[in-house]
Image (cartoon, rainbow, N blue to C red):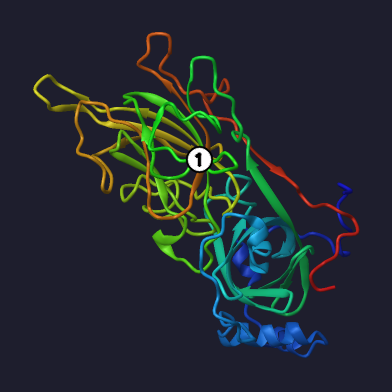
Amino acid sequence: MSRKMYNRPKAGPIKKCDPGWSSAFRLSSIGINRLINSGNLTLRALIILIATGAAASPLVAQAPPDQRPITDISLSDPDFHIQGEYAGSIRLAGCCRLVGVQVVANGEGRFQANVYRGGLPGNGYDGLVHYTLTGARSGEQVVLGGENLVVILQQGFAAVVRSSEGVRLGFLQPVKRLSARQGARPPSNAIVLFDGKNTDRLLNAKVTDDGLLEIGCETKEAYQNFTLHAEFRTPWLPFARGQNRGNSGFYLQKRYEVQVLDSFGLDPQFNDCGSLYKFKAPDLNMCFPPLRWQTYDIDFNAPRFSKDGQRTCKARITVRHNGILIHNRLELDNKTGGGSIEGPNPLPILLQNHGNPVHFRNLWLIDHDRSDNQFSSHVEENSTGRTEPILRQTDFLRDRNMRRADG
């Protein structure tokens, strides 16, 4: 595939940027009427639904959906190929602005999306302003609306962004990202917990025919202070909500849970993916879409206790999700959720069984209590002490002749 950019529409001179981008989103009944009166019947119908707040319902009645979790992309429905990440620049407030969009499928042709200023989380998003869109499928197209933006999506096409007045603002390219930590090789002093075959260091381990580790196992040994690298993949469950959507977790010492969940495209909560369960939400939601491999790199310092059993130092944890720092030397007040009671004795690491088919691969750790290991993070830092961004984008569709969703 060509890597050249597609042709962009001609645009006038760029004005000095307005400090706030929401000023570009003024409601215009005239603009809505222009779209309704356009020649695109599908677009007209969906704009009417968005304007009346009815876009969450599919236009055509559908058969009762199969709500079983899907772990094989080839068995997914058409909505799976609309859900995902999009990025590019659009004209807002008289200037070009980089934006990222995460589109989440909610089953039966319903969708919601977050629009992020500056780019996708971990790739430009400033962490401040984002807007929510909702919409539905009609035939092959999906139209999302909100904040006086209209985004038209179709599999295999570039997404089209319009204002509520019908003005084309730009195009967004489908993006598939992967963590630069994906496939990280264990260093020479690491303990390999699972390499796709050997499960000698795990208890109750079950492996799929294609070499993936299933939920519910734990390490045979207990670890006190360590760095853990793990890769996981959540299933496709568009009809599920909350804690039923690809739930598992890494229970460090069976006490402190780093949550695993399909929280893609959501505002981070204290029980979402990357959270220290019901204790602290991640600083940034770095979830990828379901059925894409994700990584955790966790540095864990166990709490310290005096001889009489009194805690003298809290547990401390640093977590990088898909290579991006989401918890930095966070002190843990106590165990999390249903974890075991805190104590001086180390306990195994548990991969929680919450009934969802979450899978794992490439699990290894560095035991910092071994005399030949130094107590430091395996993720290298630059001379400024800041961790370099280690997220890269792949399959960035840049075909000059790429079709656009509105034709």
Where residue 145 sits in the image (x, y, percent)? 63, 75
In the rendered image, the residue lying farthest to the front is 209
Q: Quadrant of residue 23?
A: bottom right
Image point (77%, 75%), residue name: 167
**Label 1 crowding class (10 Å Cα cut-off): few <14, some 14-19, many 20+?**
some
- Side of 161 where 79 appears, left or right: left
In the rendered image, residue 373, in percent from the top left (x then y), is placed at 43, 13
Placement of 109 over or under 204, stated as above or below: below
User: Where residue 125 sits in the image (x, y, percent)?
Assistant: 59, 50
Decide which of 66, 376 is in the foreground and name it: 66
Q: Position of residue 345 (x, y in %)?
A: 22, 26
Q: Is residue 42 left or right of residue 100?
A: right
Q: Residue 347: which quarter of the image?
A: top left
- What residue is pinned by disc 1? 207
**Quadrant of the image containing the C terminus:** bottom right
Q: Is 289 left, or right, of 170 in this rendering?
A: left
Tell me what residue is drawn at x 42 percent, y 37 percent: 205
Compared to 1, does 102 lie above or below?
below
